[in-house]
Amino acid sequence: MAYLTGIIIVGIVMCVPITAIITDYKRKTMRFKADIVREEIELEKLKQQNFIIETEKMKLELEQMKLDYTSGKNDLLKIDERVDKNVR
């Protein structure tokens, strides 16, 4: 009986550091996962900002192309008018 009591006491005493080690490991793992999630959120924010910037850039380029196209049309009309005047 004394032998069994000694084993139980040693087992209980050994559970305390093992529990502390497991708890510390889980805390570190959770911190690591939290850091990864924070970095992913920041990356998504950067992606969103980049998307907005690219969209605005494309809008500006489209407006510039429209302006170039309309001014080019006017230039073509002026050239056609000059050609018509020279032909007559």
Image: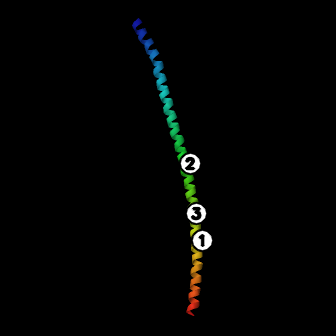
Tag 2: amino acid: Lys
Asked if residue 1 shows in the view, the reply is: no
37 to 7, vertically: above or below: below
79 to 47, vertically: above or below: below
Residue 43 image offset from top left, x and y in percent: 53, 47
**Residue 26 located left or right of residue 64:** left
Q: Disc number at residue 45?
A: 2
Are the residues tagged 2 and 3 within 8 Å (C-beta)?
no
Tag 2, which secondary structure?
helix
Q: Distance of mark 2 from mark 1, alpha carbons?
A: 33 Å
Are the residues tagged 2 and 1 within 8 Å (C-beta)?
no
**Residue 78 located left or right of residue 25:** right
Among numbered discs 2 and 1, the one appearing first in the sequence: 2
Are the residues tagged 3 and 1 within 8 Å (C-beta)?
no
Residue that sits furthest to the bottom in the current view = 88
Q: Distance of mark 2 from mark 3, alpha carbons?
A: 21 Å
Residue 86 image offset from top left, x and y in percent: 57, 91
Q: Which residue is rendered at x = 50% and y = 35% of the image?
A: 32
Tag 3, which secondary structure?
helix
Q: Which residue is rendered at x = 58% and y = 68% of the image?
A: 64
Q: Which residue is mark 1?
A: 67
Q: Distance of mark 3 from mark 1, alpha carbons?
A: 12 Å
Q: Disc number at residue 59?
A: 3
66 to 80, vertically: above or below: above
Q: Which residue is rendered at x = 52% and y = 44% of the image?
A: 40
Tag 1, which secondary structure?
helix
Among numbered discs 2 and 3, the one appearing first in the sequence: 2
> Residue 10 sits in which quadrant?
top left
Residue 51 image offset from top left, x and y in percent: 55, 55
